[in-house]
């Protein structure tokens, strides 16, 4: 049961990821993407990365997906308003993606990393352990990421704001 | 939590690599075959998440928490990227009344 749980969740991830890119309605795409991210959360729990599971749940499924849905509702796109690419271009895109899969799988086979994944220390992905690493070894990148978020906030407000002189 | 972590035992590392490769490639295909800028953006998110999963798997494999810290940084970066990207999409919509990327084909030249 334990191993097959991974394969079941992996199957669900791939299935919903395919639905994301093939759904006609963008709102359905967003909803499928939320389910895909939920399966990723289950993967993190299976890897005992509890901190990442919680962050993935809150940040991705909560904040980012709500932002996507909000913008979709703001833009009021109808289902048929944007046509799809021609069948030839779609075919070329899918074949190109398959070639990418084949190339990467071939290189992964050369890597030959077939040993089973074993959790050596139980508390590897817990908040306590990660916090110690984050605030000692990665303190400077952590502070820099706050500047990144601040500049992103200022930039997005500046971009989305209407120009006052034009109005 | 004991029984959940037992589920980890026995899944080979290259199956995680295969899963990440497939999800990443689905993201690439999505970027290539869709015309709606928002769906293209969601495909990019899919690619970011595939890499996150692989980083976590290797972090567990090498028993090194640095990989999971990097995933945390990627998530912070993704949040910033989504905010900027969606602001740009809103601005494109305001100027062209659509989010079709084919309207912006002058950017190719």
Image (spheres, grey):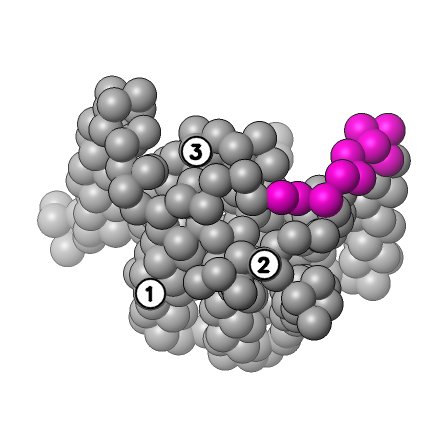
Q: Is residue B25 visible?
A: no
Of the pair A138 and B25, the residue shown nearer to us: A138
Compared to residue A114, the image places residue B102 above or below, namely: below
In this picture, residue B87 sits left or right of residue A157:
right
In what quadrant of the picture does the C terminus of chain A appear? Answer: bottom left
The secondary structure making up most of the magenta span is loop
Residue drawn 27% across and 32% down? A132
Compared to residue B105, the image places residue A84 above or below, namely: below
In this picture, residue A166 sits left or right of residue A126:
left
- Which chain does the numbered disc 2 sit on? B
- Which chain does the numbered disc 1 sit on? A
- Secondary structure at numbered mark 1: helix
- Secondary structure at numbered mark 3: loop
Question: Label 2: which residue?
Answer: B6
Give yes or no for residue B42 being in the magenta stretch.
no
Q: CA distance from mark 3 to mark 1?
A: 25 Å
Label 1 packing within 10 angstroms: few (<14), some (14-19), many (20+): few
Question: Label 3: which residue?
Answer: B65
- Which chain does the numbered disc 3 sit on? B
Please identify, in this view, whether the residue under mark 3 or under mark 1 is nearer the observer: 3
Residue A40 x/y as whole percent:
53, 59
Pick whichever of labels 2 and 3 is earlier in the sequence. Answer: 2
Please identify, in this view, whether the residue under mark 2 or under mark 1 is nearer the observer: 2
Marks 2, 1 in one chain: no
Label 3 packing within 10 angstroms: few (<14), some (14-19), many (20+): many
Question: Label 1: which residue?
Answer: A62
Of the pair A40 and A156, the residue shown nearer to us: A40
In magenta, the rendered stretch is: A108-118
Residue A162 x/y as whole percent:
20, 52
């Amino acid at each position: 049961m334990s191993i097959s749980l991974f394969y079941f969740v992996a199957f669900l991830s791939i299935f919903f990821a395919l639905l994301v890119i093939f759904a006609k309605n963008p709102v359905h795409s967003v909803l499928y993407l939320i389910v895909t991210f939920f399966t990723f959360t289950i993967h993190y729990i299976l890897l005992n990365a509890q901190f990442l599971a919680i962050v993935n749940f809150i940040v991705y499924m909560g904040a980012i997906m709500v932002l996507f849905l909000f913008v979709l509702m703001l833009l009021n796109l109808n289902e048929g308003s944007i046509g799809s690419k021609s069948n030839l271009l779609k075919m070329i895109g899918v074949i190109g993606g398959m070639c990418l899969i084949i190339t990467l799988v071939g290189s992964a086979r050369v890597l030959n990393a077939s040993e089973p994944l074993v959790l050596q220390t139980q508390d590897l992905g817990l908040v306590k352990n990660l916090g110690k690493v984050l605030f000692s070894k990665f303190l400077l990148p952590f502070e820099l990421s706050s500047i990144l978020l601040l500049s992103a906030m200022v930039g997005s407000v500046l971009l989305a704001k209407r120009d006052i002189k034009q109005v | 939590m004991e029984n959940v972590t037992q589920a980890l035992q026995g899944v080979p590392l290259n199956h995680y690599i295969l899963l990440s490769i497939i999800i990443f490639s689905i993201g690439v295909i999505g970027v290539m075959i869709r015309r709606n800028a928002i769906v293209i953006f969601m495909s990019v998110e899919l690619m970011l998440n595939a890499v996150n999963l692989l980083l976590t798997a290797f972090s567990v494999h090498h028993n090194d928490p640095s990989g999971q810290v990097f995933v945390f940084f990627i998530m912070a970066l993704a949040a910033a990227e989504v905010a900027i990207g969606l602001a740009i999409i809103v601005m494109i919509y305001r100027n062209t009344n659509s989010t079709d990327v084919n309207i912006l084909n002058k950017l190719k030249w």
